[in-house]
Amino acid sequence: MSETDRFEFGKNWKAFLASLDQQRIERAVESLRQTLGVESMEGKCFIDLGCGSGLFSLAAHQLGAEVTSIDFDMESVQCTEFLRENYAAKSPVWNIQQGSVLDASFLGSLGQGDYVYSWGVLHHTGAMQDAIALASERTRVGGHFLISIYNDQGGASRRWLRIKQNYNRLPSWLRPGLVVLVASYYELKFAVARLLRFKNPSPRRDWRAKKADRGMSAWHDWVDWVGGLPFEVAEPEQIIEPLRQRGFILEKLKTVGNGWGCNEYLFTRQ
């Protein structure tokens, strides 16, 4: 894949940070607390592989963890540095680096963490199974490995791949138009489905739920979804079985059923 076909994740995250407020930060902290089943991460090491906006690195820092944030995209690194400078006063227990999860030597230099976190990242590397294997090795024995991976919808996933490829081939000034077109089509379908169930067809409730769930933004998630390349998908057993063979026990699984989006996995390393 050429660099011109790779989605500019960092650019999208920079745009997202313009909407960041204290409520979104609090939502991210609460999401991390609930997902990991902890009240505090004091004295623990949290490795964020593919830190993106830096929001969940910040959440882990606010829960008391020593944080290492990694991203391949330099603009994502800059986003995370911005959050550290503005919310953590350049904390000495928050280390931020640019690097690839596919670089075994680089990852090895990070040591191991009590929590290794990679939400919606490893399916964007172009070598998902290798990325999962390398990322999992950063988890110490007794530690936790949390990842989310796009669900395999069969033919629908193949169609999404074509949409993403077309997005990245468009001139930059045309790309928002494709996002609006695709998002409008699906938001209309969702509205009709709600109406048929005698519910309010407005998407605002779903948008508020997205913000409440992880502090995220509906628009920037649509941009990421329509444009995000590389793009790979997996059924749950394709994630669970290889990690089981590597000594990981599945503690929690949150799936999207037959739908689109990410299945979320929480493992403990034996």
Image (cartoon, rainbow, N blue to C red):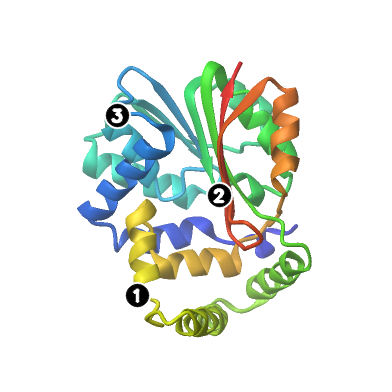
* Residue occupying the point 55% across, 49% down: 120
* Depicted 220 relative to depicted 116: above or below: below
Q: CA distance from mark 3 to mark 1?
A: 30 Å
| Of 171 and 130, the residue lying toward us | 130
Of the numbered discs 2 and 1, the one sitting upstream in the chain is 2
Residue 5 sits in quarter: bottom right
Q: Position of residue 3 (x, y in %)?
A: 67, 58
Q: Position of residue 250 (x, y in %)?
A: 61, 30
Q: Position of residue 145 (x, y in %)?
A: 55, 30
Considering every residue shown, the one lying at the far front of the view is 198
Q: Which mark is on residue 142? A: none
- Residue linked to disc 1: 204
Of the numbered discs 2 and 3, the one sitting upstream in the chain is 3
Q: CA distance from mark 2 to mark 3?
A: 23 Å
* Depicted 169 relative to depicted 37: above or below: below
From where the camera sits, is residue 111 visible? Answer: no
From where the camera sits, is residue 162 visible? Answer: yes
Tag 1: amino acid: Arg
Q: Which mark is on residue 120? A: 2
Secondary structure beneath dot 2 equals: loop
Q: CA distance from mark 2 to mark 1?
A: 23 Å
* Cβ atoms under marks 3 and 1 closer than 8 Å: no
Relative placement, left or right, of 262 versus 48 is right
Residue 170 sits in quarter: bottom right
Q: Position of residue 165 (x, y in %)?
A: 70, 70
- Residue linked to disc 3: 39
| Of 80 and 135, the residue lying toward us | 135
Relative placement, left or right, of 18 versus 168 is left
Secondary structure beneath dot 1 equals: helix
Of the numbered discs 3 and 1, the one sitting upstream in the chain is 3
Which of label 2 and label 1 is nearer to you? 1
